[in-house]
Image: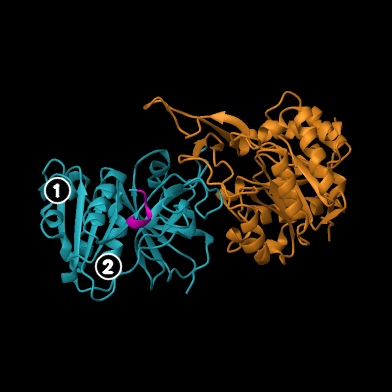
Chain colours: A cyan, B orange
Amino acid sequence: MYMKKTVIDFLLLENKKLNKDNFLLKLQSPIPVSELFPGQFINVEIKDASEIFLRRPFSILDVDYTNNTISLLVKILGRGSKKLTDAKEGQNINAIVPVGKSFTLPTENDRILLIGGGSGVAPMLFLSKICGLNSAKVTVLIGARSISDHIDISDYQSFGQFFFTTEDGSLGEKGYVTNHSVFTANLAQYSKIYTCGPDLMMKAIGKIALQKNIFCEVSLENMMACGFGVCLCCVEDTKTGHKCVCTDGPVFNVNELKW
Amino acid sequence: MVNLGVKIHDLEFKNPVLTASGTCGFGEEIADFIDLSLLGGIVVKGTTLKHREGNAYPRMAETPSGMLNAVGLQNKGVDNFITNIYPRIKDLDTHIIVNVNGSTIEDYVALTERLNELDRIPAIELNISCPNVKEGGMAFGISCPSAEAVVKAVRKVYSKTLIVKLSPNVTSISEIAKAVEGQGADSVSLINTLLGMAVNAETRKPVLSTITGGLSGPAIKPIALRMVWQVYNAVKIPVIGMGGIMNATDAIEFMIAGASAVQVGTAIFIDPTIPVQIVDGISSYMECHKIQSVNELIGSLQC
């Protein structure tokens, strides 16, 4: 079923600090959110901040389809995200939802590798949870600078096998996700790779997936003004011309990109 | 019941609130959010004779109370519009106006001739003010002789309502308005974006791929209001006002300054329901001030 794009006042149920610059915001929706999937995002109005004019897009960490709540992982990157993390529980958060296309959900014969870097971990955790695969078929590789940048994933542990990398070696293997043994040892065992994180990380992963001819989807986050395909500001130069990251993406198969 | 109807040349609008070109696609993109038939009109995305990919990313920079864009008229060309888009939107119960762009006078004329054949397009908005294209666009709108030349050529081949969209990047917008009125324009719409720029202090690089771009949003509203008022006093044809309109009060201010109708643009990016909220807000204002016809507001500034 198609969920109509709507401007909604959500109720902020919970605003929890996860580590030094990551927050979990749990929003109560007044309407059913049954058609929200990993990779889609919501475009949030930042209130009472005169210097902030445009909405800010945030990817969805989790959806409780029964209670109609949405959880966001908000990493402080600039003024907008900082202001949002100052919001108080009980406050209204205005957002446009849903925005963008989701990742292609795997089928039951797939073995999938999910790779998240930085706040890109959010849609990967969400995907691990709702992809419908046995946890033995789901490998999740999460990269960060240091152990203090990692968020607690214990709520998702049962959905897959989790591996970590840090640039300083303080958690898991030292180095980037593309240096990790899960990635370097036997990548061909995976039928689908999904990734979200910094551009350089996704490009490195995408190139190798292309070489090895493995299905690979990435989630881009180009700067956008509207989020619903009218301003044409967030375009990615693809093999078939400029595509809007907000409506044609944010999820793209690496095959479509000029990477 | 208040009367919201306004007239631009021969064309009657159910209310004075239109959506601005480049901010609502072809209308369909915002149909999830609002009932499009509640709008006075929809000015669809700037169209050119041939497909255009537009400028390279990045194309946008947020500014205090506004934004810069450098999209560069990305569109699939008039053939795609006529074949694929027009059949889907032609029966909407609102006026569909096409924003017309070209690099040369011949382009403008050829494109206009194609649009003249479409029964359900009662007007075009001739864009001689796009700041984000290398050839044509704003170049036509910043001098009286070139503005006159393009309007004269298009007027010859277009029998329906001809609106000319003016650039604010000129010394005297009234002079340009008078020049296009003299060549048979039925209305002028203003303002297009103001040429601006953003710099990244960390990298010492421009934020936009094109270095400069068009500024829109509430930041430009006082300039737009001033220009609408100046042009209203300079020409006899109706003026369509735009520039930073975010709510009904803004829209009413433009009408008091002389606009017969308004266009809502950048506000749609923030909340696509704003144009309909503005229609309702104008009604409430009129009821509150016991104004029967919205036409009483036009140019009612008391100096």
Label 1 marks a residue whose chain is: A
Image point 18% across, 68% down: which residue?
Answer: A158
Report which residue position mark 2 lands on. Answer: A129
x and y percent of residue B34 in the render? 63, 61
Report which residue position mark 1 lands on. Answer: A179
Region rendered in magenta:
A254-258
Q: Please tell me which of labels 1 and 2 falls first in the chain.
A: 2
x and y percent of residue A169 in the render? 11, 44
Amino acid carrying mark 2 in the image: Lys
Instruction: Tell me: B159 left or right of B83.
Output: right
As helix, strand or loop, the secondary structure at mark 1 comes to helix
Q: Within the image, what quadrant is residue A38 found in?
A: bottom left
User: Magenta-highlighted stretch: main secondary structure?
Assistant: helix
**How far apart are the two marked residues, 1 and 2, measured between alpha carbons?**
25 Å
Say above or below: A148 vs A103: above
Q: Check if residue A165 falls in the magenta segment.
A: no
Amino acid carrying mark 1 in the image: Asn
Instruction: Tell me: A160 left or right of A78.
Output: left
Image point 41% across, 66% down: which residue?
Answer: A36
